[in-house]
Amino acid sequence: MRKAAYLSLSIDQIKSRAKSLRDMLKSCVICPRNCRVNRIGGEMGECRIGPDPVISSFGPHFGEEPPLVGKHGSGTIFFTGCNLHCVFCQNYEISQLRYGETVDCRRLADIMIHLQDIGCHNINLVTPTHQVPAIIEGLAIAVSMGLTIPIVYNSGGYDSVETLRLLDGIIDIYMPDMKYGDNAVGRRLSGVPDYWDRSREAVREMHRQVGDLEIGEIAVHGLLVRHLVLPNGLAGTEKVMRFIAEEISCRTYVNIMDQYRPCYLASEDPDICRQITREEFKEAISMAVSAGLSCAE
């Protein structure tokens, strides 16, 4: 059985990574937005979150991808805020309205240990991108308390390669979204000018670190990509699938998701104000299969 990646590092090495990440908050370049605000000093960037962990909820989750859930659930921690402003966000109360509680890193570590103690198979960091420094600081404390289960980095896919490199050897499973195959759509629907460019860079780096998904009784290591099908082809599914197959690996585990529904501000946009059709979903699956990918519905 493969042990969690971070167990190959000393606690001091994890703390050193946390310090390097925290230093990036002084003129924040944690994500590709590069807001350059001093989050340590109380300034706020696009994520509207300071340097301390802000958590909406935590607990075992049985609705995640089957390779993560197993018998006892994925130990999810939902982080408040987001570096994307998706107009259709299904968790907008957390991501955009920022419902949550500010805690310290010791409390975050206690939550990780609690999830392990109740039998969760992994620690699933949901929307971690903008809170990475506090997460790794909390992880160092949790390791000193006996944490041993894998870490899942469950992000929107708009991640900085520089930040990801500081997570090399810490993260066991990367689970990014690849939302769009076009920068213009990313600007329109998520408020960033370069989503397609940055997400490709991020997924390349994630795969370099962890490779294809390894699944025994449960996933223990590797890359799992999520792609939400949008109405009217706005997700650029064919382009995304071709990129994954040709530039990442044709063995990449891809979850093509059909649960789009018009939430938050989506009802104001005629192109995304409806659920997808069965035909749109079947077409997306065909695109992935044509590219030679393994897809989980």
Image (cartoon, helix red, strand yellow):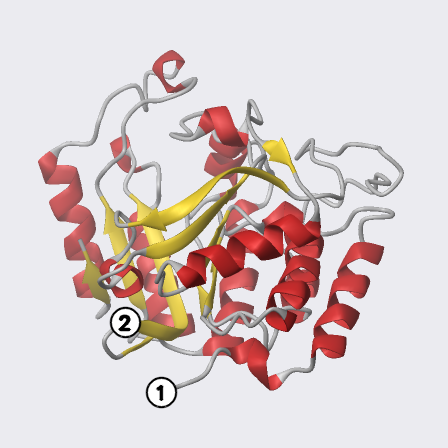
The amino acid type, in three-letter code, at marker 2 is Ile
User: Which SS class for mark 2?
Assistant: loop
Q: Nearer the viewer, residue 144 or 39?
A: 144
In this rendering, is residue 296 above or below 230? below
Disc 1 crowd, CA 10 A, few/some/many (<14, 14-19, 20+): few
Left or right of 199, for residue 88: left
Per the model, the C-alpha gap separating discs 2 and 1 is: 11 Å
Q: Position of residue 179 (x, y in %)?
A: 41, 45
* Residue 64 shows in the view: yes
Sooner in the amino-acid sequence: mark 2 or mark 1:
1
The residue shown at (59%, 37%) is 192
Residue at image mark 1: 1
Residue 88 drawn at (x, y percent): 40, 27
Q: State the residue at coordinates (70%, 46%).
A: 104
Name the image quarter holding residue 101. top right
Using the image, determine if residue 156 lies above or below residue 207.
above
Asked whether 57 or 212 is in front, the reply is 57
- In the rendered image of this protein, does residue 217 appear above or below residue 272? below
- Where is residue 159 shown, x and y percent of the image? 59, 54
Residue that appears at 10% across and 38% down: 279
Disc 1 element = loop
* Residue pointed to by mark 2: 218
